[in-house]
Amino acid sequence: MGLDLGSITNLALVGTSSASQIFATSSNADERAALSRYQAQSAANQAVIDRQNAVEAAAAGRAAEQRLRLRTNQEVGQQRAQAGASGFDVGSETLTDDFAATAMTGEVNALGVRDSAQRQVNAYLRQATADENQATFYRTEADDTEARGNRSSGNSLLTSLGSVAGSWYGLGGGV
């Protein structure tokens, strides 16, 4: 009937080769998906760090702004004390204008510090959003890779079944 040891060995080799190909296809897809999931987790972790940095930058900005305002108030106080110690009328319009100018300059500087801190906060928040988007991309890529791997394994299985069946029928195993 044509079922000699060489034919059976050939059939076994075709079947083994097919199984090996299916396993390799699936394993490769799993490895790529695992890498994408790792990258997604790494990007998500970076987004958390970026958000923490934004909170810290906001707090540092508020503290710097407050220190600058205190320094300005101290400077205005020193100007008043020096003027009073020198015998000037601290309530005079000229000195009041000088004190107001010092206070206004300090306030402008404090607002500049606030603006700078807010810009830094916004940069961290933008980066966090970009990292979150990147994490979503990597998760989607992992899902797609797994789906493609499953489809590819299924295609390999169907192709392999055809090869095995062809070998089987070639041996006279079919009816």
Image (cartoon, rainbow, N blue to C red):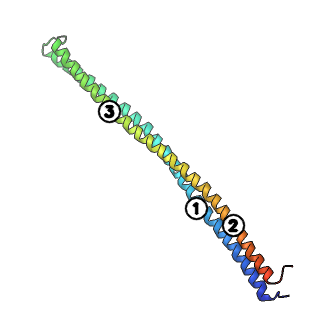
Question: Residue 113 shows which numbered tag?
Answer: 3
Is residue 131 depicted above or below 164 in this figure? above
Tag 1's secondary structure? helix
Q: Residue 46 location, x and y as percent?
A: 48, 48
Which residue reaches farthest front? 175
* 40 relative to 111 in the view: left or right: right
- Which label's residue is closer to the chain start, 1 or 3? 1
Tag 3's secondary structure? helix
Question: Residue 155 shows which numbered tag?
Answer: 2
Question: Residue 32 shows which numbered tag?
Answer: 1
Please name the residue shown 53% across and 48% down the image. Answer: 44
Of badges 1 and 2, the one in the foreground is: 2
Amino acid residing under circle 2: Asn
Please name the residue shown 84% across and 81% down the image. Answer: 173
Is residue 81 depicted above or below 42 in this figure? above
Is residue 84 depicted above or below 146 in this figure? above
Q: CA distance from mark 3 to mark 2?
A: 62 Å
Tag 2's secondary structure? helix
